[in-house]
Amino acid sequence: MLRGTFTALITPFTERGDFDRSAFRKIIEEQIAAGIDGVVAIGTTGESPTVTHDENIQIVEYAVDIVHGRTKVIAGTGSNSTKEAIDMTKKAARVGADAAMIVCPYYNKPTQEGLYLHFKTIAEEVPEIPQILYNVPGRTGVNLLPETTLRLSQIPNIIALKDATGSREHLHILEGKLPEYFSILCGEETLTVDFIKAGAHGVISVASNLYPQIVKAMVDAALSNDFNTAEKINAEEMDFYKACFCESNPIPIKTMMSMAGKCEEVFRLPLCNISPENRKRVQNFV
């Protein structure tokens, strides 16, 4: 079971726009030093849409090499082509990732049966790696319904759901119906404590790029049923969490990471630098 705080890593680029291996290593080492439970390479926060397929696997492999078994490495391998997602997931397994996070197919808007067959086929074609369903309808244009999640949870190597719907509704519908090994991980920073109260097992976090110790302390407290501590931290950090999404992720968090000297403030188009108004806002948290 996946449990705890998993950081959705930014992908640092050099001023020329190439992958910054040195900055990436330092970021991961800071995560490990903070006791983070795992890192996600090349998810939404890692600018997956503008990273090439070759870069994707190279970055995942580099993360695996850096971590060297000290925490979990989850690879983002999703696509709106089932065939392509199978290929990427096989490659992630080959380079040693601990799990693959696979987003719902975007733009082509499959039916619930299409979603079921998509994830089922990937799981059957790549049985050697555990897989995480990633439901983020605000980005994909399609919502993985609880009934479909329940069907998919019966497939042994589908082990978790990242729920970025912005609502606990699915969580309540699924309560008591999932296999014991199946995890639900919150994908909405501001709802983490509420999700854990409702039975979730942790978070895949954007904010923990910059402050892994704080997010982990909050999640660990909540998972230990110390909700007084968890809610205190949550209230203290809520403005920061909201600032992480004042523009499209990962623009705010990468800007803050740059301000903190952890990477260059470089994005690949169509993502671009933060607006002057929001730059002032995020400066308050560095």
Image (cartoon, rainbow, N blue to C red):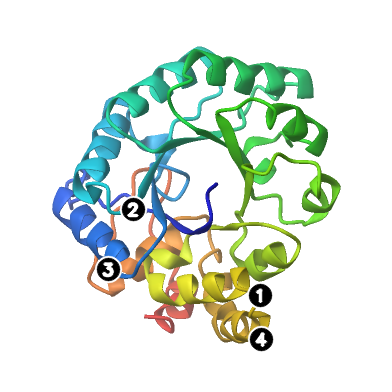
Q: Residue 232: x percent and y percent?
A: 61, 87
Q: Is residue 174 above or below residue 193?
A: above
Q: Quadrant for residue 188, please give it.
A: bottom right
**Residue type highlighted by circle 2:** Thr
Q: Label 4, on which residue?
A: 228
Task: Give the CA distance from mark 4 to mark 1.
Answer: 9 Å
Answer with mark 3 or mark 2, whichever residue precedes in sequence: 3
- Alpha carbon separation for disc pair 4 and 2: 28 Å
Q: Is residue 211 visible?
A: no
| Rendering coords of residue 266 (x, y %) | 28, 54
The label on residue 225 is 1
Specify whether 83 is left or right of 13. right
Alpha carbon of mark 3 to alpha carbon of mark 4: how far?
26 Å
What secondary structure is found at the residue carrying circle 2?
A: loop
SS label for mark 1: loop
Q: Quadrant of residue 254?
A: bottom left
Of marks 3 and 1, which one's residue comes earlier in the chain? 3
Q: Is residue 255 above or below residue 113?
A: below
- Indicate which disc, 4 or 2, sits on the residue closer to the N terminus: 2
Mark 1 or mark 2, which is nearer the start of the sequence? 2
81 shown above or below 246: above
Give me the C-alpha separation between circle 2 and circle 1.
Answer: 24 Å
Residue at point 76% right, 56% down?
A: 167
Residue 71, numbered circle: 2
Q: Are marks 3 and 1 in contact (CB under 8 Å)?
A: no
Label 3 residue SS: helix
Question: Where is mark 3, residue-wise?
Answer: 33
